[in-house]
Amino acid sequence: MQNQRSPRIAFYRNNVEDLLVVGGGYGLREQRSELGKIELTQPEQEELMSVDTIVIDYLGMATTEEIWPGLLIDDPSADIKDWWWHLGALHHRSYPADRLSEGLRETYLNP
């Protein structure tokens, strides 16, 4: 499965790719939340980390004007460990880096 993409992650990946191409991202948070609730295989976890890294990298590189405004509105009621609900804080560099996994933290701290 190393070179195959998981159908369980495909919709999230497609949404992230749309985010990069057209500045979309509608539903991205909900999709990522659902993926966090299911048990993934090791290859799926690696693929998810790869897609998550794309999101973190994009938020660090894109200007505020390039990002769909809805993505920058954080949900204060969401658990801080669920970083996908705090994309505005990630973009504005105010998210606590220690709440990210090691791989994502590296991307966040070194845009």
Image: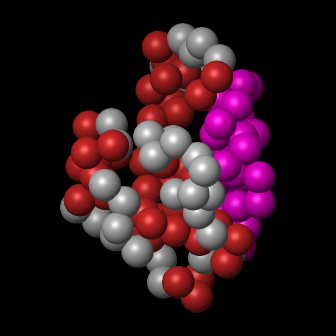
Q: Residue at x 57, y 57 (%)?
A: 76
**Against 16, is 38 above or below?**
above
Residue at x 57%, y 15% (from the top left corner): 40
Residue 48 % position (x, y): 53, 33
The picture places residue 28, in percent across and down from the top left corner, at 69, 51
- The image shows residue 84, relative to residue 68, as above or below, that is above
Residue 60 occupies quadrant: bottom left
Residue at (65%, 29%) from the top-left corner?
A: 35
Q: Is residue 88 above or below residue 39?
A: below
**In the depicted view, which residue is nearer to us: 69 or 46?**
69
* Nearest the eye: 98 or 68: 98
Q: Is residue 108 visible?
A: yes
Q: Give the image quarter of residue 46.
A: top left
- Where does the image place residue 104, in percent across and percent down from the top left? 34, 45
Residue farthest to the front, as pictured: 77
Quarter of the picture containing the C terminus is bottom left
The correct choice, above or below, for 89 with respect to 78 in the image is below
The answer to whether any part of residue 5 appears in the image is no
Say which of 26 and 53 sits in front.
26
Quadrant in which the N terminus is drawn: top right
Q: Quadrant of residue 25?
A: bottom right
State yes or no: residue 32 in magenta: yes
The residue depicted at 52 percent of the width and 42 percent of the height is 79
- Total labels: the figure holds 0
Magenta segment main secondary structure: helix
Coloring scheme of the render?
A: secondary structure
Which residue reaches farthest bottom? 65
> Camera-side residue: 111 or 1?
111
Q: Which residues are magenta?
A: 6-35
Residue 94 in percent (x, y) is at 35, 67
